[in-house]
Image: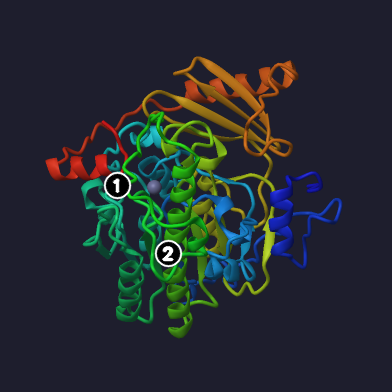
Amino acid sequence: MVVTGIPARRARAALLTLSVVCSPVHVGCEPAPLRAPEVSASVATTAKRPDVILVMMDTVRTDHLGLFGYAKPISPALDALSEIATTYGRAYAQSSWTAPSVASLLTSRYPRELGVGQHPNRLPRNARTLPRVLREHGYQTLGVSTNLFISSRYGYETDFDRFDERWLSKGAKPTSSWVTNRALDFLREARQEDPIFLYAHYFDPHYDYVLHRDFDAGAHIYGPNPTRTLSFLGQKLRPELGEWDMVVSRRNYDSEIAYMDHHIGRLISGLKGLGRFDNAVVVVVADHGEEFLDHGSIGHGATVYDELIHVPLLIKAPGQTQGAWYEAPVALLDVAPTIVDLSGLSEEPRHLGTSLREGRQANDIFAATFRPTAKIALVRGRHKAIIDYQANDAWVFDLWEDPYEQHSIAAEHPELTASLLWQLERWHEGEFEPSNTHAVPLTQGEKALLRALGYGE
Ligand SMILES: [Zn+2]
């Protein structure tokens, strides 16, 4: 794949994570595949399988991380990890809010089929989640979550041997320290002879945006905190919000990322101290990004623009010691198949994604949100199409020339537009109708919490 012509911010980020095998300054450079696991499926025993560490960063935009070219030094731990892992420059979540995105990631199926496209229903009992697959092959499965949507209320504890959700986030109260502490406790208490799957779900970058005293990332240059509360999150833009609100919000959001990054760094150090890092599969990913008036709104879940569905993804294969940058689009549907592959297990027939171990065949990537009505997206190479059924409109963007999706080229390229929209509608119509009706009745307290976190009725 030729990677010249990529947007400046991505080229810059790529240069920051120079790989010995792929640099964007080389015309015709091929993306680097992940290094093959050191066990083969035919001879592997559970004792030889690699540990799998899956770190979920709730609500993290790619363009607020140093490894993606962000100027503020708020992600030193993730930047360091990128020097020994493969960074996916164009990874796409299959939805723009937690419940559908994480359900899709863990099952390699589209959210709507799982019945979690529009509502955070309970996972279907027959959903073959990644922890279920790994547990069947001798893994100890350990989960720590701070997001209500990824909790026992929605069936997520089922496939974990140990699952801790005691600190489901209340929004403003920081939880990253607790996630790392609990994850390290689990690792220390785990059986040494069996491989581990650890799922650690960090939540702090999610609204509310708190300024952390020791992680202000140069916050002083923006002046003091505003006196009024930043209680503006919602699906609709409130007209009184202005640029200053966004400056303050972004500053505090950055502080949350820096705070979380510090504790992810502690987790990585802890893994190294326990001798469980070098030969592990380590995946760091976000479920979605966050919008700060990029397209007229705040928060996430309401659109499928790149600030929400283009997410950071890093994968370190067992024994990998060199960083690499992979520029072609990949889907979060590909994460579970990649983990299964790198763990030396045979392919799961129900996985829709493909393993990234040998690179990904170029094909279409789809995403959707249904809050409150359907907005669907298709990424094909440098192009992206969006259909908004609420606005009854559609757009096509050239992401290399217009990475912030400001200028639709649909009118200028009618044939391309027709092809993309036809494929997108065909996918939407052909998707499984929701079969899962396991709605979870929420308590008044849980409803209040979700409203406080920006999830409207
Ligand atoms: Zn989320």
The yes-or-no answer for disc 1 within 8 Å of ligand 1 is yes
Relative to 256, 279 lies left or right: right
| Residue 418 image offset from top left, x and y in percent | 67, 17
Residue 39's label in the rendered image is none
Q: Name the residue carrying label 1.
A: 149
- For image coordinates 67% across by 27% down, the residue present is 407
Q: Name the residue carrying label 2.
A: 260
Residue farthest to the left, as pictured? 444
Of the pair 170 and 41, the residue shown nearer to us = 170
First along the sequence among labels 2 and 1: 1
- For image coordinates 30% across by 69% down, the residue present is 178
Does dot 1 land on a helix, a strand or a loop?
loop
Of the pair 17 and 172, the residue shown nearer to us = 172
Tell me the quarter of the picture where residue 341 sits.
Answer: bottom right
- For image coordinates 41% across by 73% down, the residue present is 195
Q: Amino acid at mark 2?
A: Met
| Residue 363 image offset from top left, x and y in percent | 65, 37
